[in-house]
Image (tube, coloured by chain):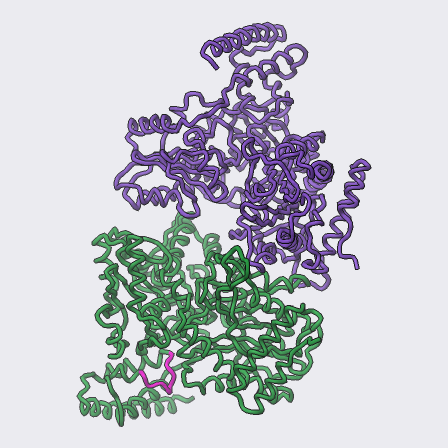
Chain colours: A purple, B green
Amino acid sequence: MSGEETSKNLEDQRNLLDELSSRINSLLKLHNISMSLSEVFAIVDGVNASALSQADDGWLSMVAHSVSGELRLTLCELREQRLRSFSRKTSDASEQRLRLLRKMMDEQNLDGFLLPRADEYQSEYLPRSSQRLAWLTGFDGSAGFAIVLMRCAAIFTDGRYTLQIRDQVNEKYFEIYNTAEMLPLEWLKTNLVQNERIGFDPWLHTCDEVIKINSVLASKNATAIKLPKNLIDQIWIDRPPVPLAPIIPHPEIYSGEAFTSKFGAINAAMMENDEDVLVLSSPESIAWLLNIRGADVARTPLPLSFLIVKKDGHAQLFVDQRKIINETRNHLGNAVSILPFEEFGSELRALAQDKKKIRLDPKTCPAWVEETIHSVSGIIIRGDDPTLIPKAIKNSVELAGARAAHIRDGAAFVKFLYWFSLNSKEGQIDEIIAATKLQNFREKDSLFKDLSFDTISGSGPNGAVVHYRVTEETNRTIKLGDLYLVDSGAQYLDGTTDITRTIAVGDPGDEARNYFTRVLKGHIAIASSKFPVGTTGSQLDAFARAPLWAIGADYDHGTGHGVGSYLGVHEGPQRISKVSNSIALQPGMILSNEPGYYRSGAYGIRLENLLVVKSEVIPNADRKMLSFETITLAPFDTSMIIEGLLADHEKNWLNDYHEWVRKELLPLLNNDESAWLIEATEPIGSE
Amino acid sequence: MSGEETSKNLEDQRNLLDELSSRINSLLKLHNISMSLSEVFAIVDGVNASALSQADDGWLSMVAHSVSGELRLTLCELREQRLRSFSRKTSDASEQRLRLLRKMMDEQNLDGFLLPRADEYQSEYLPRSSQRLAWLTGFDGSAGFAIVLMRCAAIFTDGRYTLQIRDQVNEKYFEIYNTAEMLPLEWLKTNLVQNERIGFDPWLHTCDEVIKINSVLASKNATAIKLPKNLIDQIWIDRPPVPLAPIIPHPEIYSGEAFTSKFGAINAAMMENDEDVLVLSSPESIAWLLNIRGADVARTPLPLSFLIVKKDGHAQLFVDQRKIINETRNHLGNAVSILPFEEFGSELRALAQDKKKIRLDPKTCPAWVEETIHSVSGIIIRGDDPTLIPKAIKNSVELAGARAAHIRDGAAFVKFLYWFSLNSKEGQIDEIIAATKLQNFREKDSLFKDLSFDTISGSGPNGAVVHYRVTEETNRTIKLGDLYLVDSGAQYLDGTTDITRTIAVGDPGDEARNYFTRVLKGHIAIASSKFPVGTTGSQLDAFARAPLWAIGADYDHGTGHGVGSYLGVHEGPQRISKVSNSIALQPGMILSNEPGYYRSGAYGIRLENLLVVKSEVIPNADRKMLSFETITLAPFDTSMIIEGLLADHEKNWLNDYHEWVRKELLPLLNNDESAWLIEATEPIGSE
């Protein structure tokens, strides 16, 4: 684009905005809305920084209670116009940005700076305004940590991103490490010089992390310096606005329990534990406790905020007040005061000065909170976030919602499978087309809100990249002989789904069949396991791996994670993993069951359903026993099964599962889809 | 006994001692031994407080390098005479002892006193001089904790001892709790009053424990007071002497590695970690590192001592110097200085003042050590005891020793099984007779030193008591229809054994057979498992339980513990347990494999072999794999197996195992025993 064209473009844009502004100004006056034009622009820019889809106009409530007619159309036009003016282009600007950062460090007498891939809420999905690590280094994977010293800098990520990070980060400026081989703090310890001063942003590190940082630095007589303002924020000129999306009530027909009832239980526990105040810093916890949802980040309906709960049942929600639309204010009533985010610190200090016993979870709470309480010699009680377990144990309404959502999601998935079976053999479709098609089938559902994570759509060798995300560059045409792995899910108002199937396109060969069958054996071992009350997911994990271990194979990820109820698709605290976990499984918890096998450069296999923990009655049992109910519905590709490797009880499990899938889904399918499903779920090994 | 008789007895004893003393005096002079009579008496009393058997006269080296002839006989006579004069009788003296203790507390301005069942070394087996908890409360189980406040007192133990503790402790003086329901520090927290002062002996608590104690007390504004001297020691008038047994070198033909070589590896790690000094407080670690063994406590050949290792390769062993006989002094050479125990503190302080970086293991090191270093502002590095992993990984010589010991132990065990088969059906034998007979078979071995733990010999309902120890009161005649459970092991110079078998006397019925077969299935699942490098025992544990879980049953103990090489029969850090454990299994580690099932009031079942972790080669494997080699040899009772419950691979495993047992043991058995073994190991399920 030439300079002339650019300036022409800019002028056009400015004219358009001027014209829109004047129209909106008149309309605001016409409707008696006392909001300035610049306030409207701030809302629109914040909305564009949020996860609200273009089609979703719920944000208009943040302008006025009821917006319709020409004002509605004009505001939507403004949103679209402002979105276009966002520059999405990034370039390798690391050299210049590092130079600016080191200049800031020098001015503040710092020898180093710690930059985690984290926001104040330790979110899995970050708003763009919090993607400081990506801005500085170019790396945008979901786990990372950079350390910038004056003489050198390093960036760290885990095994999932070792390829991606080398692609995105310039090694001229950053040493690149896999955390399996070098932890950030180890590297820091080695590269530190005595008496150095290392800056960090206490908002972005948890209390537990800061203890570790302090201890590493102390061992070298160096000092960790809590910075009042993040250095990146001072040099990131075109930092996107923080997201702004309305917070809406999550109705009791989905949540199953009034938030006042949840409050009652939390307050009772506080009484029992002799705690005066509870600080919640995890947006998932706040969303669950208050029965509210937001749209600040992609894929998870989170309202980014902090909450202070007091023993007397009153709470304070610290949040951008524009997000609290009338409906939500009514929902929260007198029990919850809404305060601007900026008052969080002064409220905390006041409680601490009052010698209130303040509980926080050092694993998730920003160190800033602890620091603020300590600064006035307040009393801290460290303990697990008390909402974690009740949030994980879904009530009967949430479970009914999850089952219903899974039936509709299963029907959408089977429609996709049928479409895939028709179109995949001739090389007409690629990974992007397939992922888009699957999303289209899901979007037709009236309760659909978003995907629950970016779809993993990987064929052939791309399937072997465990956290693969298809891009224009990696996109691959699906060919005969491929295995195609699709891991996807959706956020419905009544539940969150997550399913993986691996589908043969033609004949991928017997070696792949052997691994597929063993992954399926592992899946069935988990799905059909019975275990006593008190058992953790860590205890069950090896059941999923044993069939692979028998031939010297394994997979490098967990077997199952907790799943929220129209909340995070990755939710703690329970999980099925070889990493030890002390959380006993309890009836009502939802978990994924997703063993896999990955042959680098060739194919990936993963088979995932969601499970609900339930009570299991066994005649003459000594113990109270539990088992799983599978709630995901979609056929497994029986063409990939080597029947001789399955024991009778495994064949029975599979046939029963397929029969149930047919029974539930046929009513939701058209004739062609039904015929396909009936054939796909033919019983195997019938003698 | 009347007063007159008592005084007559005492006079006789005194006369005998006078006469012995004068003989010994002359003999000492005759042999030019410069030791006073009172020094000789102290040695003899210490030896009697140790675990040295009456037949073992190795202790004579502590009197002089070479003792023979009349002096030898006379000294042995003295030992026997002094042993007879020990009073072993205990009575319920809790009331008086508590009164004395509270008087001491009052004098020292204390409101409470903590008394763990522990010595300075956190030993599993305590010398009698350290059995303070038993002295105060009467309870002598292997896990306990008492808290004495001015107004009340409580004692805590775990589920294994809930029956025994009610038998031994007077509830008038102590509230009795199961730690599964109430932890000592929870109770303390509830019963404390603000500002109270609670005393504890920093020698008997680990560093980690004291952190917890301090934090509980701080939450109540109370204070933990480190006592310079244990209160019990100040009121326990007739406290037995501390044990005194010679420390002897453990030759390289058994240890497989010179201690200087072990030192080299430890020193290299210290260099790498930038540590100047290592404090070892665990006698097992010291025994392993220095290739020495002792006889201070029963069942484990431990030299009770502390060790300081310096980065330059020099070490200081703090120990009663009388234990270091010439042979041991020569063995240790210049690398290890022997210092009296009393100098441990001053040496530590000097190193700390010198700002040496001192590493200790907070999980086992007495808080006294940390306190001593802190008192002069020394530098502490907290880290795992670095001998744990190399000690756990047996070298090829230790493994060869273990295999040899197990073959001889297996032969002794089969001789016992044959004897049992002849004598158990007619009600002629009881649990004590059986345990004694088994011990007699083992004692015939020339490398036998001791049992590795008190034999568990339980028939019928006694078998359901997991840590049953037969006493005169509980002893039960073995009858037709009983299940008999025997868990036993021995300390041989070349290895430590631990085996459990459950034997049918006649027909115990199909219900018991069902459980027995499922326990066997779990045993085989562990024994035949294959798993990748990096796997922990926690990951495997559920394999052993799954066959029981399937019918709603389980067992409340771990599946396997580490085993030492002529050292502790319970050795860390690896184990197979549902309790999470981060220690990856490595080739050369020895573990037990002992699933069980217990039907309270009816019978107990446990089937235990020892395993060695080994590399496993699988064709076309992606991963480096491991598996187990079973090293224990003795038949399982096939009359208890329901063959229909075993899969083919399980039958094959059992038949292969029995074939190996026959092959190895038949050469060591007489004709009758051989015939019995051949019949007992008939292959099952041959089609």
Q: Quadrant of residue B452?
A: bottom left
Quadrant for the C terminus of chain B, please.
bottom right
Does A7 sit above or below residue A154?
above
Q: Quadrant of residue A435?
A: top right
In percent of the image, x 21 and y 58: which residue is there?
B350
Which residue is at the front of the view, B593 or A141? A141
Which residue is at the front of the view, B202 or A285? A285
Work out whether residue A288 can be spotted: no
User: What secondary structure do most residues of the magenta stretch adopt?
Assistant: loop
Give the residue at the far right of this rendering. Answer: A671
Q: Is B542 left or right of B93, judged from the image as shown?
A: right
Q: Position of residue B510 (x, y in %)?
A: 71, 74
In percent of the image, x 23 and y 85: which residue is there?
B37
Asked if residue B445 is among those painted magenta in the image, a careful observer would answer: no
Which residue is at the front of the view, B6 or A507? A507
Q: Position of residue A444 (x, y in %)?
A: 71, 30
Q: Which residues are magenta?
A: B51-58
